[in-house]
Image: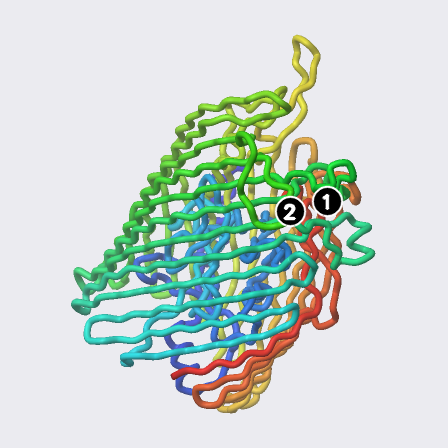
Amino acid sequence: MNFNKILITLLAIIGVQSINAQVNLQNSLKEVIVKGFKTVNGIGHLPESKDGIIYAGKKSEIILIDSLDANKAVNNTRQILGRIPGLNIVETESSGFTANGIATRGLNPSQSVEMNTRQNGYNISGDIYGYNEAYYLPPMESVSRIEFVRGAASLQFGSQFGGLVNYVTKDAPKNKPFEFITAQTIGSYGLFNSFNSVGGNHKKWSYYSFLQYRTLAGYRPNSEQTQASGFGKLQYNPSEKLNFGIEYSLLRNKIKMPGGLTDSLFSANPKTSTRARNWLKSPWNIISTYANYKPAENSTLSVKSTYLFSSRSLVWRNEDGGAVATDDIDPITDEYVPREVGTEKINNITTEIRYSQNYTVGNQKSTLAGGIRHSYAWFKRQGGGEGTTNNDFDLSISGDWGYNLDFSTTNLAPFVENIFKISRNFTVTPGFRFEYLRSTAKGHKEVEGDIQLTDEIRNRTFALGGIGLELKPGKNTSVYANISQAYRPIDYSQLEPFGTSSKTDPNLRDSEGFNSDLGYRGTIKNYLNFDLGLFYLGYNNRIGITLVTNPITGDYYSLRKNIANSVHQGIESYIEFNILKYYNWKSNYGLSLFNSFAYIDARYTNGEFKGNRVEAAAKTINRIGLIFSTSKLSTTLQYNYVGDAFGDASNVITSEDPVAGYIPSYTVLDWSASYKVNNYAIKLGVNNLTDKSYFTRRTDEYPGPGIIPAVGRSFYLGFTAKF
């Protein structure tokens, strides 16, 4: 079924039905501040337009972080983002990554590669086109809210199938020259986390800054890590119409990786470590400058420029031999085998300009929003270097690099959307985005003893279209529907040489497809919040490797090409009901029950694996929470169920391949509580209450290879004070 047919079908089904119900964020914040307790205590929705960006007709969520009972000291994604229906989380916190990956709708969650990951509206991943991995996330103690927009975000933000996740940091406190907040947390497995922030206003200036330091011995042996995160923001407000400022974010870390496990090792003891000499560092730096101008009452203009300069360095006993290979001292040399060293230097400069204009047609106010994005990224990858036989973090090598490659990506993308207000309660929002993309790859790679050279340039253009509809049958409810095209470009790893008898299809294309939604959402007074929806996602031209026969010689060779299409369809629903508010809306107590549920059927529709489930795509993801709150006390018990999945497209149960194999379903319980008195609070909780042994990922490289276990039962206790 092609894009045009689906668009016509969707419009016919909806007729005069459409989108949008929203929980007004400003009202929610006022309610929290004035009343001091929670009412409908869960997800809100973004307004039709905000800060020059259109959200009308799109499936969106917004989470107010301070309203959550969660282990924020370790960015526990399951608790913080668990109310997003269908969110699949890679839980590798104990084994080599500090930023757990996420995805929805059966997409690949590893390092959030299918997401457009942003902080305060700008990208924080390495390069959203060539290297879309997010090694840095702001600590959750510093985050005010998280904005989540599904696949229809491709028109405003970029082409990712998974949509947008935007972490909005806290800002300077209003009408205070100085405010200091400190949060200290201790916990299981040697956890110590210290978060400290300052902020304030002076005349036309405002500032906010934080510093976080965390150490962790780790759930498994050889998994200790240290991390420091920092952020600073300075803003000048010369008038009510104009403000501009600068932000700087940094991450410094050092992580030891205990290696991956085979199925038998995991079953025997998930705490087992197979590596004692694997290390990772990923220092991250982001500078962003911005200006916001309101030339008239109904128009806004914003400019945001970002420079990301970061790196990732790795020294490890590599994947040779898979998870069954042990890292032992050679009895002949009385030394370990030399480790492998790899480094990546990541740079990109991005500028995004946005303009919005409200205008009136008849008696209805419509909104036009558009802009242009320009980015240039350059990336150097060196690896395969023979390292030392030592145990420490040492990047020195003997001889030359096994591969030394330089990549670059140039992107130019104008975009526009318009809210046409057909009537008081019905809007139609078409949109268009044009993408120009230029990718280069140059360098060499040693493959099976031979030197492979690459010098490649790829230029291409894409036109993305979409439309959203929204009908508000009531003041606080809406029916929404949308369909938008998306694509995922060929990334840097797919431009590398990969075999002496291997080839890359000269007609290799970027993956492309579309997202569509149909749903009903809203609130009823202060006791019910709901969002019930259907989705259909088409993902075409997936890139993979297959064996091909040479028609002349009859020999086999590996060919990297577009090998398959997949379809992802299902249900996403969120319901939260405040029982006490239902019986007495003036009650100073709250007792809420929420359910975040998704059923996802993600399958290949052609190619070698036709009919098989897409790798890592759990069919059922169900999270249920019970929340009790007063003006001082809040406590949450959360049940998490994630269905089974497979490590790769073959859907085999067991395999010598460390990626292939079965990923069993699991159930995890989390409990958290906080007690506040004036400007002080105590926070405590237990994650994985029943000490369930489970895993969410199989990998053929670091932090494995093999199964990467999730963390068992852990406790935490924290204290927060505001001055």
Report the residue at 75% width, 54% height from top: 664
x and y, in percent, of residue 461 in the image: 39, 33
SS for callout 1:
loop
Inspect the image, locate mark 1, and give the three-letter code of the amino acid beneath it: Asp
x and y, in percent, of residue 427 in the image: 37, 58
x and y, in percent, of residue 109 in the image: 58, 51
User: To which quarter of the image does residue 179 belong?
Assistant: bottom left
Q: CA distance from mark 1 to mark 2?
A: 38 Å
Using a 10 Å C-alpha cutoff, classify the residue at mark 1 as few (fewer than 14 neighbours), some (14 to 19) or many (20 or more): some
Q: Is residue 398 above or below residue 231?
A: above
Inspect the image, locate mark 2, and give the three-letter code of the amino acid beneath it: Ala
- Asked if one can make out residue 601 in the rendered structure from this viewpoint, the answer is no
Q: Is residue 597 above or below residue 90?
A: below
User: Farthest residue in the top direction?
Assistant: 552
Q: Is residue 698 above or below residue 268?
A: above
Q: Is residue 682 above or below residue 251?
A: below
Q: Quickly name the residue at label 1.
A: 327
x and y, in percent, of residue 289 in the image: 28, 56
Tell which tag, 1 or 2, sits nearer the viewer.
1
Q: Is residue 366 left or right of residue 568?
A: left
- Asked if one can make out residue 402 in the rendered structure from this viewpoint, the answer is yes
Q: Quickly name the residue at label 2.
A: 602
Q: Is residue 517 left or right of residue 436?
A: right
